Image: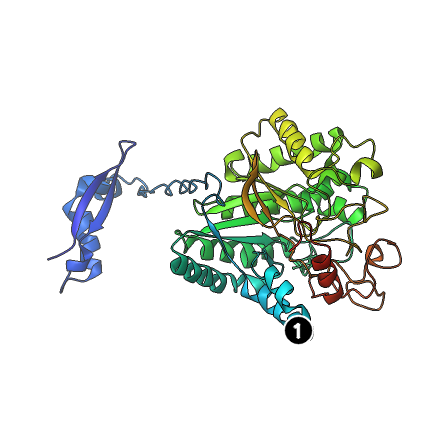
């Protein structure tokens, strides 16, 4: 049977000519089928009449289909009622330390029971996300409870614009904006989309938008500002889906606690979220990532007496109020408690690199306080913040000569720093 010509009535009342049942065409060629369409259904095109009347043939243009509606965003607290994914790569690092310190094995093994976030800090890391999610699914099937996996997206072009320790691989010059979208966001979204039954929490780009709120005096931040905003908006747009809970980074009390800074960051979030498709694209905000501020009390009141937010719990409450002023409401917070167990270890609130005397903080837990989705070990304890020796790549003066608060002998950012890890364990509060 030849393909049948069909007239299809579109919603706008116009008609188009369509070929159906092509699969059933046996001997007749496709050309004959097309002719059949034109000849058998003159009303379909009116082409012959127009040709006779000397009119230019009208080409039936089918308008492009409307863009697909964005997937609905994830809702609710993903940590509630969930088990937590334990990252075997982190466990392996702790195991290596146990190998070198067997006398401490019992204590160090307790650290392995705590989940840590997995940082997607390079294009190369993107491909490993599927394996991690497979592994999380296996843990889920074993335990029978939903497992939540926490990732950190950290590969923005011109990353860490106000410092040197964590400069990334993508820059404006090497086409980083397009590469970020094509090599990071799109493949990441595909892997997340393929796992609709898994709970995925994603912390988006630590420090980036906070740098736009307060560090535009730094040339690299000023020139990267538009790229940051666009890239993050597109990341939120691409990664928002029913199984992915997005948390935009919101720095910490000692950085954005002041009312003026909170107003600035709230305005930036408002703009970025509008560009990303609306406030509901994100579940909330992550604070204290890789930082040391206490949950309550702590040293900020002494170090920064003018800061109305002396600790992280005050900060998330006050930030919530500032966000409400720009129409962003109902958000949940994640707070990094990997290294804030001990306070009073800094001489300056701005010290951020491998702070000597720090301790592990609260263990990861769901819904520990009103408005807080979870405490989490977002910075894997034992990973360095930056190199302390000027001859090491990734050296930052804030980790070495310029910081009396930082541990010496630190490797570059992200690498395992045994001395720091052991100190965090020794000073854990609550104790292990
Ligand atoms: C580093 C990243 C690392 C992360 C977690 C950041 O400071 O720049 O490479 O993955 O810390 O340790």
Asked if residue 255 lies left or right of residue 186, the reply is right
Q: What x and y, as percent, mark residue 20?
A: 19, 51
Q: Residue at x 23, y 44 (%)?
A: 17
Classify the position of ligand 1 by quadrant: top left, top right, bottom left or bottom right: bottom right
Q: Residue at x 78, y 64 (%)?
A: 410
The crowding category of the residue bearing disc 1, from other C-alpha atoms within 10 Å (few below 14, some 14 to 19, many at least 20), is few
Locate the C terminus by quadrant. bottom right
Q: Residue at x 50, y 47 (%)?
A: 238
Q: Does the closest atom of ligand 1 sit within 8 Å of the Cβ of label 1? A: no
Residue where numbered disc 1 is placed: 102
Locate the N terminus by quadrant. bottom left
Asked if residue 362 lies left or right of residue 356, the reply is left
> Is any atom of residue 428 visible in this view?
yes
- The secondary element bearing badge 1 is classed as helix
Q: Nearer the viewer, residue 404 or 297?
A: 297
As drawn, 418 above or below 311: below
Q: What x and y, as percent, mark residue 431?
A: 67, 53
Picture quadrant of residue 99: bottom right
């Amino acid at each position: 049977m030849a393909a049948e010509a069909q007239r299809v009535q579109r919603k706008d009342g116009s008609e188009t000519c369509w070929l159906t049942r092509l699969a059933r065409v046996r001997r007749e060629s496709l050309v004959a089928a097309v002719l059949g369409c034109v000849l058998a259904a003159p009303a379909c095109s009116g082409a012959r009449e127009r040709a006779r009347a000397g009119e230019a043939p009208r080409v039936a243009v089918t308008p492009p289909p409307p863009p697909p509606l964005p997937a609905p965003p994830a809702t609710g607290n993903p940590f509630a009622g969930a088990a937590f994914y334990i990252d075997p790569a982190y466990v392996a690092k702790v195991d290596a330390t146990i190998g070198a310190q067997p006398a401490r094995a019992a204590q160090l093994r307790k650290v392995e029971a705590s989940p840590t976030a997995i940082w997607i800090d390079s294009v190369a890391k993107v491909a490993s996300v599927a394996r991690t999610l497979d592994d999380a699914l296996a843990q889920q099937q074993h335990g029978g409870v939903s497992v939540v996996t926490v990732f950190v997206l950290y590969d923005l072009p011109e990353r860490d614009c106000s410092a040197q320790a964590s400069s990334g691989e993508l820059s404006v010059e090497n086409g980083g904006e397009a590469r970020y979208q094509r090599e990071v966001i799109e493949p990441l979204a595909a892997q997340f989309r393929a796992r609709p039954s898994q709970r995925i929490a994603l912390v988006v780009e630590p420090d980036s938008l906070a740098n736009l709120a307060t560090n535009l005096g730094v040339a690299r931040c000023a020139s990267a500002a538009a790229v940051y905003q666009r890239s993050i908006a597109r990341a939120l747009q691409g990664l928002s889906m029913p199984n992915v809970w997005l948390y935009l980074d919101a720095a910490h009390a000692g950085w954005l606690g002041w009312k003026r800074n909170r107003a600035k960051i709230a305005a930036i979030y408002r703009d970025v979220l509008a560009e990303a498709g609306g406030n509901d694209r994100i579940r909330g905000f992550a604070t204290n990532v890789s930082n040391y501020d206490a949950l309550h009390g702590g040293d900020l009141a002494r170090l920064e007496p003018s800061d109305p937010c002396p600790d992280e719990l005050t900060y998330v409450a006050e930030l919530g109020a500032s966000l409400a002023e720009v129409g962003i409401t109902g958000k949940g917070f994640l707070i990094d408690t990997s290294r804030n167990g001990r306070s009073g270890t800094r001489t300056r609130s701005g010290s951020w690199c491998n702070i000597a005397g720090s301790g592990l903080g609260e263990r990861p837990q769901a819904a520990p306080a009103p408005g807080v989705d979870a405490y989490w070990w977002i910075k894997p304890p034992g990973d360095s913040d930056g190199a302390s020796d000027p001859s090491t790549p990734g050296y930052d003066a804030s980790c070495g000569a310029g910081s009396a608060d930082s541990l010496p002998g630190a490797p570059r950012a992200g690498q395992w720093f045994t001395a720091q890890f052991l100190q965090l364990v020794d000073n854990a509060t609550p104790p292990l």
